[in-house]
Amino acid sequence: MAYYAIKGGEEAIKNSLDFYKKLTKKAQKIKDEDLIEAFTFSIDKVISEGSLYSKKLASKAIKRSAGDLLNASFFLRAHRSSCQRVGPCKTLDVNEMRLHRRISSAFKDIEGGQLLGASNDYEIKLLVELKKEEINIEDFGTSSNIIKSALTPLREDNLIKKLPKEKTTWDITRSFPTAPYPRSALLQVMSRGESGTLLGFSYTSMRGYGDVHPTIGDLRVGELDIKFTHPFLKKEVKVGSIEATAVESVGTFNSDENGETKLTTGFGFCFGKNETKAISMSIIDLTLYNNSYSVGTEQIVAADFEMIMHHVDGIESFGFCNHYKLPHYVTFQTDYQIFKSAKKYAKEKEEKLK
Amino acid sequence: MKRENINDLAQITELKELKKIYNKIDKKYKIKILSKPTEQTLLVPVKDPISDSEFYAGEVLVTSTIVEVDKTKGWSMVIDSNEELSLYTAVLDASFEANIFKEEIKTLLETARSKENKKSRKLNQRVNSTRVSFDLM
């Protein structure tokens, strides 16, 4: 096999870009604020997979890619790498989230109750159109909902399996770890992972190749404050707030490191309103650390650290897949020549034997 | 209102109002831009409830500026790509500390806070209207 340099196509590339611009020019006319408001779930998917919380840039990226969300995430990830990083903000705790939505399917009676928030979950299931009647929201309370996780009481009673605490937090954007993978690296990979890939892997678990039926202990969608230290005042200030989704799924019982039987849980967290992704992440987390009670034990996809660590990043898989679009006929031509030579050799040998 | 609230409150204030007060300050005092509005990122650590450690969920885009107004330094860090907003906020931060248009700044930001509180209360009512009340069948 051999590679040899080629050149050409400059004009075709220029014309192709011009053609693309013409094809997608109407997208550029959409105002950022309109797109952010109207396509809130697309924006949130892009900021989560692009691993950069910027709704404005997500909007520009969606327009530039004419709605190809994976491509838009790719733009965002590229922009991220061009920015200086000033450091970490104050650690976020999902218990401090101002909830806009909160569901638990594992526990009915939870402190603070269940909040459906803005959702179309029941529209499809009940097949009914909402009657156009006025809803008087003035009848409802004005207080915000900052409620601890539904699992907090169980955790306080030491009924939930704990995993060892890590001394340092890994950052995969600076160095990618080798096995055994630190938990912080795994969660970071999944948090910026591609929603469909996470769903696919977690679905293998849901279908029986893993913890057979996990449930949602606490699904929360809401706002969290980003805080940073003022350089002159030396006090913590609020930089702004972000929307996020967090899920704690509940599995079966398993032994902890002391051999005690505890309830197993998995954690999912990502930027924006991304419920399917956060649920999937929590199920994979649950399965990875609790595979002994799973069907198929260690052999299942959703309990394979290598599989998860190296295959859930949408930008990497997108980039790798699309590099095939670049000229590769050089390799094919070499293979083709070898095939032709072999065929000729076989034919000559056959004729000699006659 | 304290200086540490300026950064947050400026972000919920109308940009044109911030620009007005910025122009007033600029006219009367010397605004020196020490570090022009720059896009940066902050890593976002999240507490993992299972191991009690933390992990990085991604980065948040911020725009930061450092200015000097009448020899007092001011800083801002606002969320997302927002150059103008970041510049005005840093000027407000310095001016507040230097007692320049302090009362005007306070009034402007407090008005924005009150409008924002009203908006949040409405949002909370919307959320609270979706609280499930179970009945056994």
Image: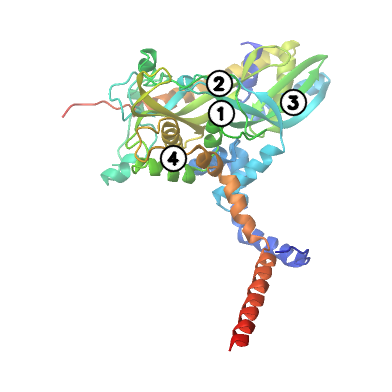
> In the rendered image, which quarter is residue A130 located in?
top left
Chain designation of label 1: A
Point out the frontmost of discs 2 and 3: 2
The amino acid at mark 1 is: Pro
User: Do the residues indicated by labels 2 and 4 lie within the same chain of the protein?
Assistant: yes
Disc 4 + disc 3, Cβ < 8 Å: no
Residue A220 visible at all: no
Callout count = 4
* The image quarter in which residue A43 lies: top right
The answer to whether marks 1 and 2 mark residues whose Cβ atoms lie closer than 8 Å is yes
Residue on which disc 4 sits = A302
| A262 horizontally vs A324: left or right | left
The residue that disc 1 covers is A182
Q: Earlier in the sequence, mark 1 or mark 2?
A: 2
Q: Name the residue carrying label 2.
A: A166
Inspect the image, locate mark 4, and give the three-letter code of the amino acid beneath it: Ala
Whether residue A292 is visible, yes or no, is yes
Nearer-N-terminus badge (4/1): 1
Task: Tell me the quarter of the image containing the C terminus of chain A.
Answer: bottom right
